[in-house]
Image (cartoon, grey):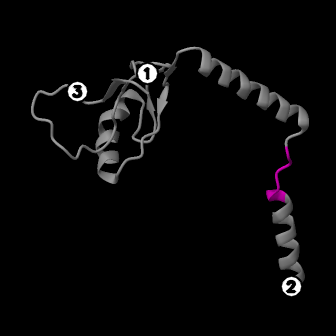
Amino acid sequence: MKHITIAILVVLTLIGCKSNLNSAEIAQQNQQLEQIAVKVKQDDFQIVMNTAYPLATNAVTNVLNGILIPNGDSANRIDLSDRDDYIELGNKSVKGELSYYGERRISSGYGNQDTGIEFNGIP
């Protein structure tokens, strides 16, 4: 019985091990990271979101699933391709407009249409 247990542990260990990246793959990753770093330092850029994966409570999940299922979305994955969610990052300003999918804890009164997260300021 001990030999079987040891054999299973050895097999699981070998299966669970991942090979390391070779030097060419590491060099390619480093080059891509350097290109991104240069781009970020030199230019302003915009991030456009395609999908949201909200972390929600059970109550929010039940409500969102009731609302979103007809659109093909769920409480765990929401397609943002038809929305204008973005973040603009620059050296002198940061702007953003993001939809909010979560539980509201503070009321903002009736008729308030600001339901998302909006910001415009200095980094």
The C terminus: image quadrant: top left
Q: Is residue 99 or residue 39 the one in the foreground? A: 39
Residue highlighted by disc 1: 86
**Residue 64 sits in which quadrant?**
top left
Give the left or right position of residue 1, taking residue 57 as reference. Answer: right
Bounds of the magenta segment: 15-20
Q: 10 Å neighbourhood of mark 3: few (<14), some, or many (≥20)?
A: few
Q: Report the amino acid beneath label 1.
A: Tyr
The residue that appears at 36% across and 24% down in the rendered structure is 121
**Residue 104 sits in which quadrant?**
top left
Residue highlighted by disc 2: 2
Does the stretch in magenta take in 17?
A: yes
Real-space CA distance between mark 2 and mark 1, rounded to the nearest whole angstrom = 58 Å
Residue highlighted by disc 3: 114
Q: 10 Å neighbourhood of mark 1: few (<14), some, or many (≥20)?
A: some
Real-space CA distance between mark 3 and mark 1, rounded to the nearest whole angstrom = 16 Å
Secondary structure found at label 2: helix
Q: Report the amino acid beneath label 3.
A: Asp
Real-space CA distance between mark 2 and mark 3, rounded to the nearest whole angstrom = 65 Å
Q: Report the amino acid beneath label 2.
A: Lys
Most prominent secondary structure in the magenta stretch? loop
Q: Position of residue 108 (x, y in %)?
A: 15, 36
Say if 13 sits above or below 72 in the image: below
Q: Is residue 44 or residue 81 the one in the foreground? A: 44
The residue that appears at 11% across and 27% down in the rendered structure is 111
Which residue is situated farthest in the bottom direction here?
A: 1
